[in-house]
Amino acid sequence: MTIYLHNPLTISLLIVFFLLLLYYLVIFIRLAFYKKTVNKKYPPVSIVIVAKEEGFNLKNHLPLICEQRYPNQFEVLVVDDNSTDNSEDIICELKYKYSNLNYLRLDNKMFEIYKGKKFPLSIGIKNTKFDYLLLTDADCKPASDLWLMTMMEAYSDKTEIVLGYGKYEKTKGFLNTLIRWDTFFHSVMYFSAAIWGFPYMGVGRNLSYKKELFFRVKGFTNHMNLMTGDDDLFIKDAANKDNVSICIDHKAHTISKAPKSLNKYFIQKKRHFKSSSYYKIVPQIYLTLIHCLQIAFPVLIILQIIIQKFYIFAISIFIIKAIIQVLVLNKINKNLKEKNLIWMAPILDFLNSIFLFSFFIISIFNKETKWK
């Protein structure tokens, strides 16, 4: 079999192949062999949760958060954003049991002119007792009673931000698999970027930073007009190559339920698209390129087989890439602990990129919605 390297399809496939290897063997490999450092200073911490119509989740998840094992003081501050359900009754009842649980209710309708959770979160942060903040959502539960302690251990002398992992619960169905893959892979992307010194996002489901940093960068002022961005756009403004650490230890994960319908998943991704358009140029190139490569690679493999008849060459390239991808991601997954995803990686990254591209096109013609 003769391979004509001057053929445009063959050259394109080789370029895409080598760029993908660059991501896995240069960028992601550092995350695969990441060794955490442990800081055992354990400062006092304020855990902040913004909730809207979350009575059921607060009842189930607040005890797990209030009962964290931690060798110093910590408070759990719930900011109730104009809820009309039984959230207030549930929180007041739990306050009798947990002395570290505090409650702040926003019931003035004038606050509703601010879209999203940035305004209630800002109010919550201003009312916290301690300088170290740990943020999560009402629909999230900690993976263990060492969540708080493990997240705080990721701080070093220079650290002002710790990026955590917020995973989705595994259930039946292909949509759940696709959402969990998207969450896993984007976490690989932003954790790796932070290690390489260009942090661009975190997730509000599991994120820690210092209150002093929040006020120094003037909170969410730069993007208060956007409903989204309380996590990633804040990181864009506040993070630099020296002040960010990551925490991928499985004890420090948070777990929530994934969207159960394609429409809810689309709404979630639409908000992410809105935020990502405000990222700095390097993260935008970093994200756009990988998704283009993930779409182009299998397409070029198929064209090599159908048009060029280069069966052995195309299949060999596919197998080499798949082996490297699975080996690197499996090493990373020893910490992130996602079940039954890695062996499907060569297929899932292509399908997910197609979904994201389709969602992006649809979102252009869709209006913004409320956060709750």
Image (cartoon, rainbow, N blue to C red):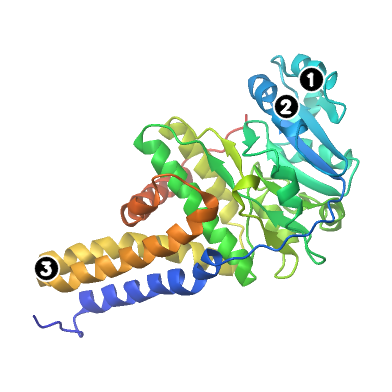
Indicate left or right for 119 with 342 as reference. right
Q: Position of residue 250 (x, y in %)?
A: 59, 48
Indicate left or right for 304 with 63 as reference. left
Q: Is residue 349 above or below residue 283?
A: above
Location of the C terminus (image quadrant): top right
Quadrant in the picture for residue 163: bottom right
- State the CA–CA distance, disc 2 to disc 3: 61 Å
Q: Residues within 10 Å of mark 2 (few under 14, many from 20)?
A: some
Circle 3 residue: 307
Quadrant in the picture for residue 142: top right
Q: Position of residue 86 (x, y in %)?
A: 71, 14
Circle 1 residue: 94
Q: Earlier in the sequence, mark 1 or mark 3?
A: 1
Report the amino acid beneath label 2.
Pro
Q: Is residue 94 above or below residue 67?
A: above
Q: Position of residue 239 (x, y in %)?
A: 72, 62
Pointers 2 and 3 in contact (CB under 8 A)?
A: no
Circle 2 residue: 63
Report the number of numbered marks: 3
Of labels 1 and 3, the one closer to you: 1
Q: In percent of the image, x 78 and y 35: which residue is there?
A: 120
Indicate left or right for 256 with 304 as reference. right
Q: Earlier in the sequence, mark 2 or mark 3?
A: 2
- State the CA–CA distance, disc 1 to disc 2: 8 Å
Indicate left or right for 310 with 208 as reference. left
Q: Earlier in the sequence, mark 1 or mark 2?
A: 2
